[in-house]
Amino acid sequence: MNADLPDAGSFRRELATWLNANADTLTPPHDGYGTLDEELAHYKTVKRALWDADFGRYGWPESVGGLGGPSMLRAIVGEEIATRALADASLWTMIEVLAPTISTFGSGALVAEMVPPFLRGDELWCQGFSEPGTGSDLASLACRATPTDGGWLVNGQKVWTSFAQYSERCVLLTRTGDAESRHRGITALFIDMDSPGITTRPIETQHGRPEFAEVFYDDVFVPEERLLGAVDGGWKVAMDILPYERSTTFWHRGAVLHGRCAQLVEHVAESPDRSPTAAQALGQAFQSVVAFRSRSRDTQYRLAEGGTLGAETSVDKILIASAEQELLETARGLLGGTIEFDDGPVAEMWRVDYLYSKAATIYGGTGEIQRNIVANRLLELGREA
Amino acid sequence: MTDQMDHLDADDLAMLATSFESAMAAAPDPSTIDQALFELGWPELLEAAPTQGAATVFTALGATGTTSGALDDVLAHALGLDVSATTGVALPPTQRTTTPARRDDEQIVVDGLVSPRIDTATSIVLAVASDQAVELVRVDPSKVDVAPVGGIDPDGGHRRLRATIAAADTNAETPGGTWPGAVAAAQVALAHQLVASSRWMLDQAREHALERVQFGRAIASFQAIRHKLSETLVQIEGAASVAGACTDDSDPMLAALAKSLAGSAARTASKHAQQVLAGIGFTTEHDFQRWMKRTVVIEGLFGSASSLPTTIGEDLLARGTAPRLFEL
């Protein structure tokens, strides 16, 4: 870290000034949510502008084109972007989830070549972990990588791969050990999504945005220099993603929820015929959002002090999932039929968020899995029956 | 010790916390605890680091399941009055954050609560709502009607306070702080107390679950039990984080949120610990029921998990937006 790095407060102020000055470029051309194509195009514009103005380079090491400094600076950028609703939150998440781990486990040449275009927004990457038979039990994955001349041949199927159909690259977990090898026989590969043999099929979901896809791998050749970490060391790569997923990404997600909460308060404050229970419902939902944001801030500080993140981030995950569901359920109640009956960009935005919130206790480790982790690792309750 | 209070660090606070806890555990009677707190430098701590100091003392109270008059001191300090073991400050009625007294012409009508400080206080300070503002008056304890020790938690010493006093029988005090500021200070202190007692209840349930064998295995091995205890820890950690986020100059809304979340966590801890402790927890052979009853009383002070969300929501609607309250 060099001495020229800004402190969090002045960084935020400078960023806010720049965001306000460049609002014309940075504000999405669409009201509410655009189509995924529109969202992706605008996301790339925002990322590029942030990079060119250096704000997008803080918190990343120089080896990937960054300017150094703590990841907290990235968290601040994410928060300010989310608060102003300048970029799609799910797209924004991908860099925070994938780039740090790839920077750790990729070879020096691979990292230097691949990571900067991702950070600049030139490219999008996706994460190929889940499979039809592999949900909560990740170590059971079956998508196989077989050694071949100069690399691997990959065969199998992934599912719930976010933005696969828009992505240039994928971080893929493959089975390289025997069927019983569980987490000891998994290898992580970095794949070009335009490789021959890859077919993606977007999944129609209840919230109406096809951001997930099924991906089929049919004799897909992956060169050996695309290995991440060690052969049969993929579990370590997967586990390394967790702290990033639960720190900067969560802080960003918390900012999104806080923004929605503020919008809901504005809406209710302006409503002429406010329900008598509106204040209580708002207070209750806001309280859950604040509990999550506070916990997430503690996690940021722990990370900044050099701490490692583990099982205790399951607490963060449970808090954000319950806050999100509570907030959107409260919104449905207080918006007076908007989510159920109305059309147009604002209604559509609330409806998408409402329906998407139902997944908050499913993706990224279900609520049940998180509670198991809390019981095992934090409460040390011994083995489960 | 007093000289060093200006340079408190985490180690000093940890040492003080240990001293407070030992004193409370050794003699759990409120007036003895008050005496020990004053001997250990509690008023100086409150002066040097109001929020952190209160957090230390109230965490110790929660962890030991004891009560004291320390809340009166937090209020006195926040109102800019001298902190003294012989001064009591009346509390709002349960579930409320309003002043415990209001002015009705030449009379002052009191409907509130008192802490166990009432047993040693030589004067009681009342915050009185009038048309203009909140005024403070000091009154002799003999002028007010304090309910006898009783209720759900007689040992805790919190009681109702009711009286109609001639304004002429009171002495006006000049406040150096505001009532909302005092409410916030009390809420943060109580949030720390509730978090600590919730942790105690969870610990008791956890130990019992590991020891109690049914169907040939420890009941801690059953997912129904594990998830109840996990949920309890999650709520406690969320509440603890917000209580810890409160500083001397944070927005009063954050204090209300801390208290509400801590109350909610305490309700969850008390409910799940009761269920996991089952039969033994329902008997007076186990300490749980003492903690549970005390939590019921403390949870109602300065607004509860039932009443505070409405207060917070009204505050949000008045502001017209949701404030961030803290930054990275």
Image: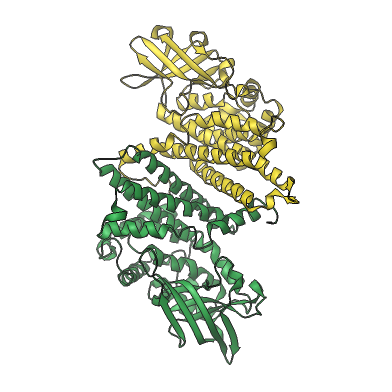
Chain colours: A green, B yellow
Question: Where residue B194 appears, x then y in whole percent?
Answer: 56, 36
Residue at image position (48%, 73%) is A159
Q: Specify whether A366 is left or right of B63.
A: left
Q: Position of residue A91 (x, y in %)?
A: 40, 67
Question: Which image quarter holds the C terminus of chain A?
Answer: bottom right
Q: Position of residue A99 (x, y in %)?
A: 48, 70
In the image, residue B256 sits, relative to residue B228, either above or below, namely: above
For the residue pair A208 and B309, the one nearer the viewer reads as A208
Question: How many circles with numbers are drawn on the protein?
Answer: 0
Q: In the figure, residue B17 lies in which quadrant?
A: top right
- The front one of A204 and A147 is A204
Report the residue at 60% width, 87% height from top: A147
Closer-to-camera residue (B228/A126) = B228
Q: Which residue lies at the image location 30% right of the left edge and 49% below the top edge? A: A335
Q: Position of residue A74 (x, y in %)?
A: 44, 61
Return the residue found at the far right: B216
- Report the residue at 57% width, 21% height from top: B151
- Does the image show residue A159? yes
Q: Is residue B325 visible?
A: no
Depicted A103 relative to depicted B18: above or below: below
Residue most extreme to the front: B215
Reply above or below: A19 against A322: below
Please say if B4 is above or below B154.
below
On screen, residue A345 versus residue A188, left or right, reads left
